[in-house]
Structures are given as structure tokens and as C-alpha cells.
Image (cartoon, rainbow, N blue to C red):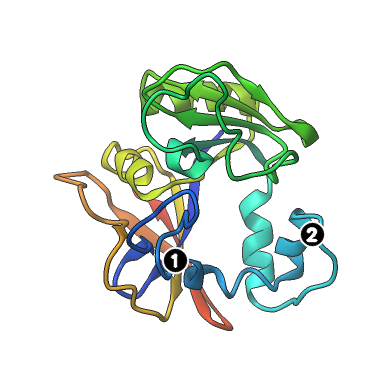
Amino acid sequence: MSKLRFNIAISLDGFVAGPNQSQENPLGVGGMELHQWLLPLAVFRDSHAQQDGEVNASTPVVQEWSENIGATVMGRNMFGGGPGPWGDDPWNGWWGDDPPFHTPVFVLTHHPREPLEMKGGTTFTFVTDGIEAALEQAKDAARGKHVSLGGGAQVAQQYMAAALIEEMEISVVPILLGDGARLFDNLGDADLTLEQVRAVEAPGVTHIKYRRVT
């Protein structure tokens, strides 16, 4: 059965992006430090058409993130383009002409936009009627495979609050950001019970995987 899976890097003080996010600085001040463990990995470099790279304990964890994934859901900030209407000549996002997804991607937004077909099998579909509609469309497109939740923090909070995330891997990076986008805010009285599946220690990061207990 198709599951909604989520993975994200987080600082010791709970932030998944730094303050002052912008088009020039999409992860905010200091936010790139959350991913320094990932960037040298061969598995990451290969997905971005780069050669060589490292192999360590993080490698099988990162490989698993893309296994049996048939679609992705993300928020508008993760796609790129900022708030408000898209305009007459909208930007095509952070991901370049050949995004690394190679599957349908459903972007949550308040403003309609025609689907955007890119190279490599990625098509961005813009969903204006909420998180459940986006997930339903993604599961239909995934055809029995799993759906990846791309983030960012606000979208993840909505799916956590609705108890729709079935598997979650938190990659804890030993830094303090002090401010920015905090993952576990705005959950209200969410009925979210998690069971730890594993913990993997690797250079510069510890990966902790949970599944939702129903």
C-alpha cells in the first residue's frame, strides 16, 4: 500500500532552515550547514549529474529515500517563486531544467498555475485545494508506489497535524541555528504517536527513522 514518507535534516535546536529565507538564500542564514554531510555523497552527486563522491554510513539511508517513490508533494517555497500570484512569466523554480525527482510532483499553492513539464520525467502540478487533495492526486499518480513529502516546514506541520505521514526520517545535524523555520511548531493537539525504527550514526549526522503508530 502506498505510504507518505518524509525525510528532513534538522539542527539540534529544532530548525530545518535558517532565518531570512529568500530567493537568493532559500534555506535561510546558515541553513546550508544542515546539508554539508549530504553534498559530498556519491549518491547525492549522481542524482545531480555529478561524478565521484564519498560512500559512508549515510549512503544506504539516502538511497532508501528514493526507493519505490512514485510521486512527491511539496510546498510552494520548496518549489520556488515566493508568495502571491505567479504572474505572466512565472519562474520555473529552484530545480533547473532536469529536476532530480523524475516523477510527478504536486506543489501546494494558493494560486492556480498550469502544469509544468520538465526534462527527465518530472511534471509539477499545482494544487490549490489543500493537503489531502494533493496527497490523493500524488497517490493516484504513484500507482502503488510510495509518496515522498518534500517539505518545507509549514507543509510538513500540516501533514503531521493531520496524522498523514506514515514514515519519517529525521537527520539530526550537530549545529545550532538559533532561529528560522522550526519543524515541530504549530501541531496543536495532533494525534501523532511515533515508534523508532532505527538510528544510524554517520559522519556529521545521525539519522533517526520513525513510523506512525495507529
Does 84 sit above or below residue 208?
A: above
Disc 2 secondary structure class: helix
Distance from label 1 to label 2 (Cα)? 22 Å
Corner quadrant of residue 40: bottom right
Assess disc 1: are there few (<14), some (14-19) or many (≥20) residues with their C-alpha within 10 Å of its C-alpha.
many
Which of the numbered marks, if any, corresponds to residue 111? Answer: none
Residue toward you, 78 or 142: 78
Residue topped by disc 1: 31
Q: Residue furthest right?
A: 51
How many C-alpha atoms fall within 10 Å of the one at disc 2: few (<14), some, or many (≥20)? few
Q: For numbered disc 1, what is the local secondary structure?
A: helix
Of badges 1 and 2, nearer the viewer stands: 1
- What's the mark number on residue 46? 2
| Residue located at (34% from left, 58% from top) | 20
Is residue 183 rendered to the left or right of residue 152?
A: left
Q: Nearer the viewer, residue 63 or 54?
A: 54
The C terminus - image quarter? top left
Say whether residue 149 is left or right of residue 163: right
Find residue 211 and report its horizontal and vertical position in percent.
42, 53
